[in-house]
Image: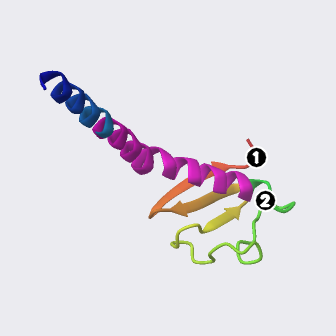
């Protein structure tokens, strides 16, 4: 019986550890990945003047809305989860 209790404790510890790693990924890593993907897509769609038409691309036109992208002079800004991420598309 003592051995079974020890294995149950290790199972619980493992499940809690996996949940903690998943939470950290979801909260801290995924927003950065999503913003970088959005900015990379925007940089590949800028015109010759370095501007990006977010309305024509089907992205939210409101600069504060999630997923909004604006590019002016090759400087793109994306808004994701209320945070703004910037990328220079010329670099």
Q: At x 84% / y 62%, what residue is drawn? A: 47
The residue at the far front in this view is 1
Residue at the spot 58% in from the left edge and 66% down from the top edge: 67
Q: Is 47 one of the magenta-colored residues?
A: no
Split into 4 quadrants, where in the image is the C terminus? Answer: top right
Q: Name the dominant secondary structure of the magenta segment.
A: helix
Q: Nearer the viewer, residue 72 or 38?
A: 38
Residue 27 position in % (x across, y down): 40, 50
Quarter of the image with the N terminus in it: top left
Residue 55 placement: quadrant: bottom right
Pinpoint residue 24: horizontal percent, then vertical percent: 38, 43
| SS state under label 1 | loop
Label 2 secondary element: loop
Visible residue check, residue 74: no
Question: Residue 50, labelled with which disc?
Answer: 2
x and y, in percent, of residue 54 in the image: 70, 72
The residue lying at 31 percent from left, 33 percent from top is 14
Q: Closer to the camera, 91 or 68?
A: 68
Quarter assignment of residue 79: bottom right
| Mark sitting on residue 90 | 1
- Examine the rendered structure and indicate whether residue 4 appears above or below residue 35: above
Work out whether residue 32 can be spotted: yes
Q: Label 2 neighbourhood size at 10 Å, few (<14), some (14-19), many (20+)?
A: some
Magenta residues (range): 16-42
């Amino acid at each position: 019986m003592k051995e079974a209790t020890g294995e149950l404790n290790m199972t619980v510890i493992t499940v809690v550890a996996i949940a903690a790693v998943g939470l950290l990924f979801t909260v801290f890593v995924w927003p950065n990945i999503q913003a970088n993907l959005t900015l990379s897509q925007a940089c590949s769609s800028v015109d010759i003047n370095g501007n990006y038409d977010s309305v024509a691309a089907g992205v939210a036109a409101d600069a504060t809305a999630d997923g909004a992208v604006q590019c002016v002079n090759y400087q793109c800004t994306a808004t994701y989860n209320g945070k703004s991420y910037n990328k220079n598309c010329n670099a």
